[in-house]
Image (cartoon, grey):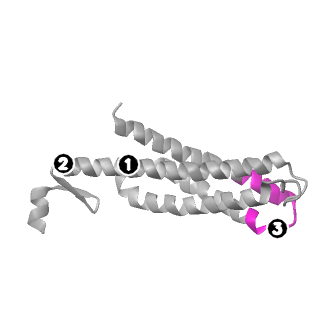
Amino acid sequence: MPPNNALHVLVKASHFMVFASATIVTGILGWFLHRTSAQNTHVIFQETVAAVTVPAYLGHLVFAQVDSYYEQSLMVGLAFSYLWLTSFIFAAQDWTGGRCASAFPRGSSCSQKKAVVAFDFLAFFFLLFGMLIKGYVKYTQNKKNRTQGREYTDGVISTSENAMRSA
């Protein structure tokens, strides 16, 4: 198996882990919000991030290897990484350090709250991991194209001669 194929498998696995983490967080937080009438902005933010991530990363699983989708994928990954980092910070502030039992939603199991913290972190970690791997794959592809006398511009690979004629 060539190295790029192995890296593409890692990117897909990373996207799947983000999707799975978002699905788990959506389920737990949805259950929290369903059980209580009180609203907590941190929990609503976390639920929104997780709920939007599920369809977005389902699409990433399908389009992960499309080269023309790379730039959009990178921007989406960057935006979601900041959202998941914020979600993780909110969860850690609310539910760690002895504040679990007294924090919203009261009476909910601390293990469920800590599961949200853990899966928030996993989603953030796998978002960054996937972006780094995609960046490395794109770098090696561009480097390979340059060494073979090709230029990669606007999603089109052209030989150096054609690039010089059009300039």
The kind of residue on which mark 3 rests is Gln
Residue at image mark 2: 147
Q: Are marks 2 and 1 in contact (CB under 8 Å)?
A: no
State whether residue 153 is above or below residue 8. below
| Residue farthest toward the front in the current orientation of the protein | 97
Q: Which residue is mark 1?
A: 136
N-term-proximal mark, 3 vs 2: 3
**Amino acid beneath label 1:** Tyr
Relative to 3, is 146 on the left or the right?
left
Is 30 one of the magenta-colored residues? yes
**Which label belongs to residue 39?**
3
* Residue at the (78%, 51%) spot, across then down: 113
Give the left or right position of residue 66, taking residue 141 as reference: right
> Which class describes the residues within 10 Å of circle 3: few (<14), some (14-19), or many (20+)?
few
Residue shown at 53% from the left, 52% from the top: 127
From the viewer's side, name the closer residue of 52 and 144.
Answer: 144
Q: Is residue 99 magenta?
A: no
Residue 45 percent coordinates (x, y)? 70, 65
Q: Can you say which quadrant of the picture contains the C terminus? A: bottom left
The nearer-to-camera label among 3 and 1 is 1
Q: Secondary structure at mark 3?
A: loop
Q: Is residue 54 left or right of residue 9?
A: right
Q: Quadrant of residue 105?
A: bottom right
